[in-house]
Amino acid sequence: MAHTYAVVLAAGQGTRMKSKLYKVLHPVCGKPMVEHVVDHIQAIGVERIVTIVGHGAEKVKDQLGSRSEYALQEQQLGTAHAVLQANAALGKLAGTTLVICGDTPLIRPETMKALLAHHQETSAKATILTGIPEDPTGYGRILRNAEGRVERIVEQKDASADEQQVKEINSGTYCFDNEALFAALKLVKNDNSQGEFYLPDVIEILKSQGNIVSAFATDDFEETLGVNDRVALSQAETLMRKRIIEKHMRNGVTIINPANTYISSDAIIGSDTVLQPGVMIEGASEVGEDCLIGPNSQITNSKIGHRTTVHSSVVTESVIGEDTAVGPFAHIRPNSEIGNEAKIGNFVEIKKTKLGNQSKVSHLSYIGDADVGERVNIGCGTITVNYDGKNKFLTTIEDDSFVGCNSNLVAPVKIGQGAYVAAGSTITKDVPAQSLSIARARQENKEGYAQKLKLK
């Protein structure tokens, strides 16, 4: 394949979104639209990507980082003017350039690759990605000649009655011979009602010069959807979510209620894992094989090991080992690492803690800023008192220790290997290995006290 480049149009403000967030940064399945576009371009091996930025330029650059070069369109004077801003980066290069909008997150890498291949096979100077909707009203129509080559694009308002019967429409995504593109861009005029320079005019210029203009029709019109408002954003979310869920089901994941399950585009899920209704798997999460993710669980940027159950719980930016049980109603906060064959029970909160293999925190406990060894049992109602109002401190609980119910471990403190903490204790000093620590007030019974109260 010849040298290939891409120009991503991402300079428009997106006023119809009615949002403080720059349009192409609105997420679809947990990822900004423009990032989906760049991901798909990178997947086909394009050599250079130039993203045209305008409103919110710095935020787009922060999102995409070094994955793209950038060109600034200071004034939004139309799509042809936007592409022309890439002239300094690409204008003198030979090859093929894909021009695509940053608000079209559904166009697949396979479609982009097929478009490029068709462009080269037909020796065209320009190739238009087209679609065939059931109702083409409002779209520019593609008019072809007897050989199937594009004669022109006619807008809805300019189309005759016969031309309006044509269903093939312009998606707004193109391939161009790079040198021909930038030469033609300099000839585009803005003598229209909006006073803007339109990219489709390049097609007319190339045709007038006797060049071949081709079109490639995608089999799936829905993937050409451009997002201009919140309604279209919701449609894109629905379509991409369906695509993602079907991919996982075909790869061996059981999804009980696909209409009520949300999976990010970057998530990895192993075969024979079951997702029950209401599950949300967000960000770059990875769920192993043979897992059960119970109803209404939310897993964000986390890794779940094989054969682990997460039941009606929240796991954020953490790692959970294999053969482990979490929940119901547990909260695993960021920077936690739960070992293999461990148990985190109902109404347990874990934060910035390492919990070793086969250790248990079965119910109603808060374990924060802690290093817990293997085979440790932490009783109901235990709290690591990690914060003094200014600083956080570490609690260390070594292997094979037992912490009784309703214990307060006031950090910094260390429970030695094999030690016992009696129920109801408040531990402020280190407990030596193999010791029993009792830190509670001595019980005193006052016999007959209740009867005396009644006589008063």
Image (cartoon, rainbow, N blue to C red):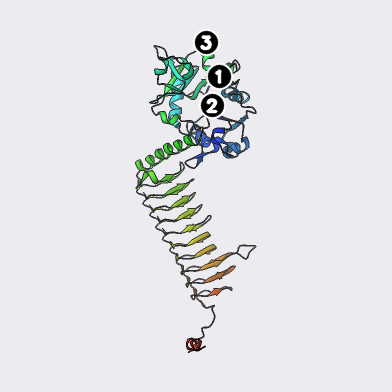
Residue 199 lies in quadrant: top right
Front tag of 2 and 1 = 1
Residue carrying label 1:
181
Amino acid type of the residue tagged 1 in the rendering? Leu
> Which mark is first along the chain, 1 or 2?
2
Upstream in sequence: badge 2 or badge 3? 2
Ranked by sequence position, the earlier of labels 1 and 3 is: 1
Mark 2 near mark 1, Cβ–Cβ under 8 Å? no
Marks 1 and 3 sit apart, C-alpha to C-alpha, by 14 Å
Q: Is residue 278 above or below residue 161?
A: below
Q: Find numbered disc 1 in the image and state the secondary structure of the residue it sits on.
A: helix
Q: Point out which mark residue 5 bears.
A: 2
Amino acid type assigned to the residue bearing label 3 in the image: Ser
* Residue sitting at x 48%, y 58%: 331
Quickly name the residue at label 3: 208
Task: Tell me where residue 455 appears, x and y as whole percent.
Answer: 49, 89
**What's under tag 2, amino acid-wise?**
Tyr
Q: Position of residue 247 (x, y in %)?
A: 38, 40
Above or below, 361 relative to 225: below
**Is residue 92 placed above or below 313 in the rendered structure?**
above
Would you say residue 212 is visible in this rendering?
yes
Identify the element where label 2 is drawn. Answer: strand
Q: Is residue 353 left or right of residue 220?
A: right
Q: CA distance from mark 2 to mark 1?
A: 12 Å
195 or 122: nearer the viewer: 195
The quadrant holding residue 340 is: bottom left
In the image, 408 versus 200, the foreground residue is 200
Mark toward the viewer: 2 or 3: 3
